[in-house]
Image (cartoon, helix red, strand yellow):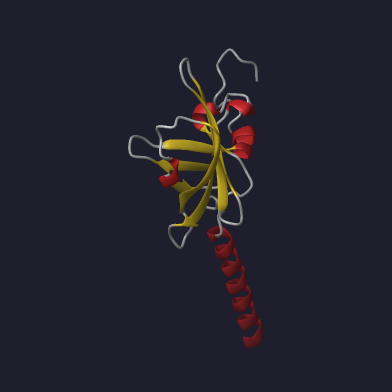
Amino acid sequence: MKRKVLAMILALCLVISAFALTSCSDDYDELALNTKYIATSDAGRESDEQSYVIFYKNNTGVYRYYYRGVSLSENYTLKFKYTYVDKDKSAVMCFYDSIDGSYSSSFSFHTWTTIFTVSKNGLMATGAAKNTYFVNEKYLKQELKNFGKKKEEKL
């Protein structure tokens, strides 16, 4: 009888432990690798007119910037290296590595750095003047189907 009760208690403890471990392993704070994080301001644009960030497993990434104005046009890809800021991997600090494309020569890219607050579904770049938000392309297409689309557009 004691063995059965002890076995039941042990089994119950294992079930509770397994449930606790799976509920704590939320992947919402994970950085999605090899996936575009599109600037929210560009969510409704064609892919060749979007600014976005992609992170790779080898602690490198790319920031593709696109802007077309009346008197100024920029379209460049900045390559960077990144490192996690903290143990829980909720933020990454990015450092300039190289750049390709057309850009304003008034900006000093060789000292470019930024910190991204990390989530599987979105990023926030912290800046001196403002924050910039990016949304995971897969999340945008699957969950935010109306985001970035004008009201008169058909879904």
Q: Position of residue 21 (x, y in %)?
A: 57, 64
Which residue is drawn at the image coordinates 58% and 73% (left, top)?
Answer: 13
Say which quarter of the image contains residue 54. Answer: top right
**In the image, farthest residue toward the left:** 128
- Residue occupying image coordinates x 61% and y 78%: 10
Q: Quadrant of the N terminus?
A: bottom right
Asked whether 153 or 45 is in front, the reply is 45
Looking at the image, is 131 positioned above or below residue 92? Answer: above
Q: Is residue 35 above or below residue 106?
A: below
- Tell me: residue 133, above or below residue 3: above
Observer-nearest of 151 and 128: 128
- Where in the figure is residue 49, as x and y percent of width and height? 59, 26
Question: Image quadrant for the C terminus?
Answer: top right
- Residue 50 in view (yes/no): yes
Task: State the residue at coordinates (55%, 27%).
Answer: 147
- In the rendered view, does 106 fall on the left or right side of 51? left
Residue 129 point in image, percent of width and height? 33, 35
From this viewpoint, is residue 113 visible? no
Residue drawn 54% across the image and 37% down it: 135
- Left or right for 106, reference 76: left
> In this view, which residue lies farthest toward the bottom?
2
> Which image quadrant is residue 132 in?
top left
